[in-house]
Image (cartoon, grey):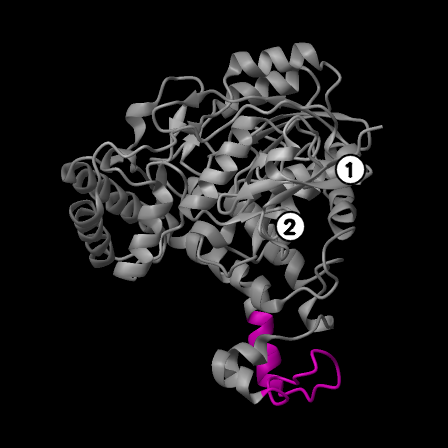
Amino acid sequence: MAELSQVNAPIYDALRRLRRMRVVPFDVPGHKRGRGNMELTEFLGEDCMNADVNSMKPLDNLCHPVSVIRDAEALAAQAFGAANAFFMVGGTTSAVQGMIMYACKEGDKIIMPRNVHRSAINALILTGAVPVYVDPDVDHRLGIALGMSVAQVEQAIKEAPDAKAIMVNNPTYYGICSDLKRITELAHAHGMLVLVDEAHGTHFYFGESFPVTAMAAGADCASVSMHKSGGSLTQSSFLLMGKNVNSDHMRQIVNLTQTTSASYLLLSSLDISRKRLALSGREIFAEAVEMAEYARSEINEIGGYYAYSRELINGDSIFDFDVSKLSVFTLPVGLAGIEVYDLLRDEYDIQIEFGDIGNILAYISVGDRKRDIERLISALAEIKRRFGREGAQLLTQEYIDPVVAETPRKAFYAEKESLPLEESVGRVCTESVMCYPPGIPILSPGELITPQIIQYIRYAKEKGCQMTGTEDLDIERLNVMKLN
């Protein structure tokens, strides 16, 4: 490892060496470097198919890395300021679940905000861990959940002093950050691990204008979606670990659910993207921030729309803000966020990240161009002119405080029955309901179904939100716990 530096890309270099060898494949995958599926090869290209290979000695093995993958992971740890880093090919979902499975076994308590990603809720089902939810503060104007306040965390620790870990979303989908350093200090003072869902914060590690990173704040683990803002292929992520985490045991935990046939397309994309960010990330993300700030200014000049930023900071539940996030509140122009999302795609051929009831998010990162920003701004101005409405009756509440009646695991595996939405009110849900993206559940297993939740589900469906999580794909029925 001593001879390696951030200019190296060990997995990528090993794949290039293999290609020069012209090895005759009598192993999987069965397409045999693309020859067995020419239509797919024409679509993806020969270079791509040649790199879709199986684990072999020259290429190492993700489940038990001893050579090039081990070296690439060491370089990633160095680039992100971590003690250790794992390449994850099951997305940040796999990393989040690995963190929780490392920290908790059945019956263990974990403190977490209720607006966690579905992967964290699903990890509770897998482990049998018991959530101690912190209901985040809400910005009622924007209709979004905020970060966890320090006082809320202190109260949760008092209520559950035996909790094994605290999980923090940092940043949220909208760019809002908690006081991660203070929360980490609190947790460690009480012997708890700190797990950070840093899916939307890859760029924090490569710039001066960003909030504190999980590793710099002293957190024990962080899950980082390299594919979101770091430029790697979809489904590729990093799991970062601090010095007090037993990385050898973490590897065993991750291997419980991770594939034994890791894609070298994903692995090499992580390797190459890490190299690029380590060498040029600061310049890349400085430019991204400049574009986001310009877009915010221009969108706010349109009138009606509100592209928010650091002016929201209150020093607690909004301790900091990710200025690369272009989050825009749309209700003042008489349009729900999901309606603006659909109009941008259907009328202007612009695909943004997501739209919810009141907001849209345009992701600005390593591959954006100034002229595309101009096109987005112009489209938003025209949407207001063509489709804007005055005094439209729009639901403003985005986050609904849950009523937790059972643990997620008990509810998920309980005897259940299926009921029409309206008839399910007052019963305990056994499945999740969420708009995706962002994948934050409106309902999770073990929570009470209320009239407000049913109203929200109906409204979100009517506005065109993509809703997932239920057995009934039409989301006209919900599974609930059977009554004794």
**Mark 1 nearby-residue class (10 Å; few <14, some 14–19, many ≥20):** many
Q: Main secondary structure of the magenta part?
A: loop
**What residue is shown with label 1?**
127
Identified by mark 2, the residue type is Asp
Q: Residue lying at the far right in this picture: please name it.
A: 484
Rendering coords of residue 422 (x, y %): 59, 34
Residue 341 appears in the figure: yes
Q: Is residue 291 above or below residue 306?
A: below
Task: Name the quadrant of the C terminus.
Answer: top right
Is 18 in front, or is 454? 454
| Residue numbers of the magenta segment | 13-37
Answer whether residue 24 is magenta in the image: yes
Task: Name the quadrant of the N terminus.
Answer: bottom right
**What residue is shown with label 2?**
472
Tag 2 secondary structure: loop
Marks 2 and 1, the one that precedes in the sequence:
1
Rendering coords of residue 39 (x, y %): 54, 86
